[in-house]
Image (tube, helix red, strand yellow):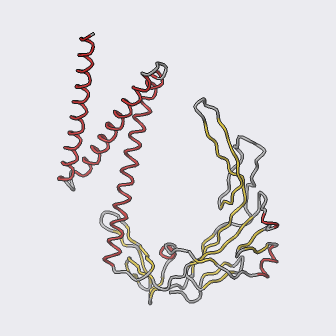
Amino acid sequence: MSENGAKDEVFNIQVPSAKLIRTVEMYQWDEDCETDSNDHRQCTYKQVWSDELIDSEFFEDSNHINPTTMPYTSETFFNQDAKMGAYKLNNKLLNQLSTTESVDTLDIVKVQELGLEISENKYYTNVKNNEPQIGDIRISFNYNNSKNVSVLAIQSKDGFQEFVSSSGYKINKLQEGTHSGKSMLQDLTNENNTLKWIFRLIGTLLVIISFAAIISPLQRLANNIPIIGTLFGWASGIFIFVLGTAESLFVIAIAWLRYRPVFSIVLLLCIISILIIVIKLKNKKNKARTNTYQCK
């Protein structure tokens, strides 16, 4: 797939691969804060390697200070001559390649020019006694070693371009190894279905959380009364969960009413059944309370 390879000009690293990644990390302070039941905020600090700058400006403890810039940045390099057969692979496709292989041959001359050191196939600004200091840099390189790839896209002249469906859905997929078009389409379908249900679950959780936020003032009042607060918490929790789930299922059912009416009707029947069960349980509970009061 690749002949010339991808190259990082700054560090003079070249590999016979279509994709090369330079990862730059800095040793920094990381803050972790927790608030207890009495609204007391307590923070702990640890030193970590991070490929992103951690802003220490708003740390609770101003003695923990991180640098605000990095001398180098993480970057991805592609072989601009990479092809699949006679067709050129663009950067959007190449970016889908994994980079699991690490570069184990580094340029010692370049290291000396930049004032760095080498340890465990990585560049460091400081490797003394394996005790990095805040602000030290660690640089590593990884690349892709795939020999064969499969592409699901439209052939355009000597390359590929994404396919756009009538609904606006775009297909521009590269998969490592040899795969049929049918299997790649099935993989896309499975990915979309998984993503769809993840969004549905997230939506349901957001609805439940919003109902919980609405009822929270009542919960705070109930907590001032012994036992009542606990009972109210259990009852409101069940009510919120049932109501939030029912509302989410209702939205999903309405969305599917045109395209999958049977599925939509089944969901609506499920919602009605849930609500009927909840109402019956509530009426039964109220009736039991009434009988208790009469006995007294």
Q: Against 56, is 148 above or below?
A: below
Report which quarter residue 19 is drawn in: bottom right
Q: Position of residue 93 (x, y in %)?
A: 47, 75
In this rendered view, identify the residue nearer to me: 248 or 45: 45
Q: Position of residue 104 (x, y in %)?
A: 67, 80
Q: Against 47, is 155 above or below?
A: below
User: Horizontal placement of 124 versus 279: left or right?
Assistant: right
Number of labels in the image equals 0
Q: Residue at x 44, y 89 (%)?
A: 85
Q: Position of residue 256 (x, y in %)?
A: 24, 52
In this rendered view, identify the residue nearer to me: 78 or 249: 249
Identify the image quadrant of the C terminus. top left
Q: Residue at x 66, y 59 (%)?
A: 50
User: Horizontal placement of 183 versus 229: left or right?
Assistant: left
Q: Position of residue 105 (x, y in %)?
A: 69, 82
In this rendered view, identify the residue nearer to me: 246 or 68: 246
Q: Residue at x 41, y 85 (%)?
A: 157
Report which quarter residue 63 is drawn in: top right
User: Horizontal placement of 40 versus 188: left or right?
Assistant: right
Q: Residue furthest top?
A: 296
In this rendered view, identify the residue nearer to me: 89 or 195: 195
Q: Residue at x 64, y 46 (%)?
A: 32
